Structures are given as structure tokens and as C-alpha cells.
Amino acid sequence: MTPKKKQHNFKERLNGEVICGIWYTTNNPTKKMPFYIRLDNATSYEKGQSRYAVAGANNEALIEQSAQKLRDAVKTGNVEQVASLIEFPISVLVKNKKKPLNNYTEFINNYSLIFTKPFREAIINSVPHNMFTNANGIMLGKYGELWFNAQGKVYVINNYISTTCTVTNNKIHRE
């Protein structure tokens, strides 16, 4: 007996490392199902090599301890600890405008504008272990909210990234 071949259509474009949309079979187009798929980690490395070596980091423990410290500091509201894990200067989005921050004090003074509630939640809900990495650095957060360098310091803060993708009434909504 030959298995029946199923055909499927995908009617949404790929947006970064996330696909969300509506799944349905062509032989029953009334049966629809919303879906959300996210790629967490696709890093490969040689046995015995640091999983973060591609980013120039040979000390996995340092990277993961820094990421854990930062996540815990965001969770507890320890602004000074967060600032101590940032490499300056760094550019961030403040009130929808790119703003360079040159030092610890400038960062502290702008912390609440950078680490908004949804951004803090994204960091708190991230996993600071087995993080995605590439030649640009080591990523913390589902959507690349923070990037660490080989020394375990945050050198990129993407506090503008949309983290909302919902499907209601068979329509896709992104904010």
C-alpha cells in the first residue's frame, strides 16, 4: 500500500530564526492550526573545543557565569551588577532613538529606559547555557537581545527587538 502524499502550504515569510503562521492541509483547507517554531541553537563545534570558540571564547565557564550573573542581576534589579557586565562604549535604543553610552554612569542613568519590563522579562526567561554563538559573539535571549564577547562582557544590546508573535482568528500579529 502506497502512503498518501500530503501537501502543505506555508503562507508567511521567514523572519529571523522564528516562523509563525497557520498550518493547513490542501486536501482539507478548513482545518487550520496556528504554529510557532523557533530555532534555539544550531552551533557546531569540535569535540574538546569550547562551544563558544567560533566567537573567540575558549572559556565556556566564564561566558556562562557572566550570562547567569547578568540574568540574575536583571531579575533582582541589581543595576550596578548589570552595568559591570557591559563593555563600553555601547549603543542602545532610548525613546526610539539610538543613543551611545560611554560609561558605567551613563548606563546606570538610562537603565530603566533600556531595560523595559518586556525586555527584562525576555532576559529573565532566557537560558544562560548552551547559547547560540557565531563569529559575532554569544547570544542570550530568544531573539538576540544581548550579545557577549569572548571576555564575557555584553557588547550589543538589542532592546528594540519584537518578541510578540500571536495568531488569533487565523491572522498573524507581530508587535
Image (cartoon, grey):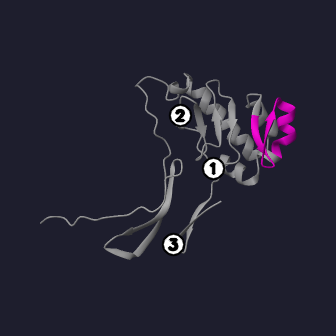
Disc 3 secondary structure class: loop
Q: Position of residue 64 (x, y in %)?
A: 60, 33
**Amino acid residing under circle 1:** Asn
Label drawn at residue 133: 2
Q: Which residue is mark 3?
A: 170
Verify CB contact (< 8 Å) between mark 2 and mark 1: no
Q: Nearer the viewer, mark 3 or mark 2?
A: 3
The magenta stretch is 91-112
Q: Mark 3 to mark 2: distance in Å?
A: 34 Å
Q: Mark 3 to mark 1: distance in Å?
A: 27 Å
The disc, 3 or 2, on the residue closer to the chain's N-terminal end is 2
Query: Which residue is depicted at the point 43% across and 28% down?
Result: 45
Label drawn at residue 125: 1
**Amino acid residing under circle 2:** Thr
Q: Residues within 10 Å of mark 2 (few under 14, many from 20)?
A: many
Disc 2 secondary structure class: strand
54 with respect to 3 (left or right): right
Disc 1 secondary structure class: loop
73 with respect to 105 (left or right): left
**Amino acid residing under circle 3:** Asn
Q: Quadrant of the N terminus?
A: bottom left
Q: Mark 2 to mark 1: distance in Å?
A: 18 Å
Which residue in the rendered view is the most extreme toward the bottom? 30
Which residue in the rendered view is the most extreme toward the left? 1
19 with respect to 157 (left or right): left
The disc, 2 or 1, on the residue closer to the chain's N-terminal end is 1
Verify CB contact (< 8 Å) between mark 3 and mark 1: no
Query: Which residue is depicted at the point 85% across and 38% down?
Result: 108
Q: Position of residue 53 (x, y in %)?
A: 51, 24
Please tell me whether residue 78 is drawn above or below residue 14 in the rendered image: above
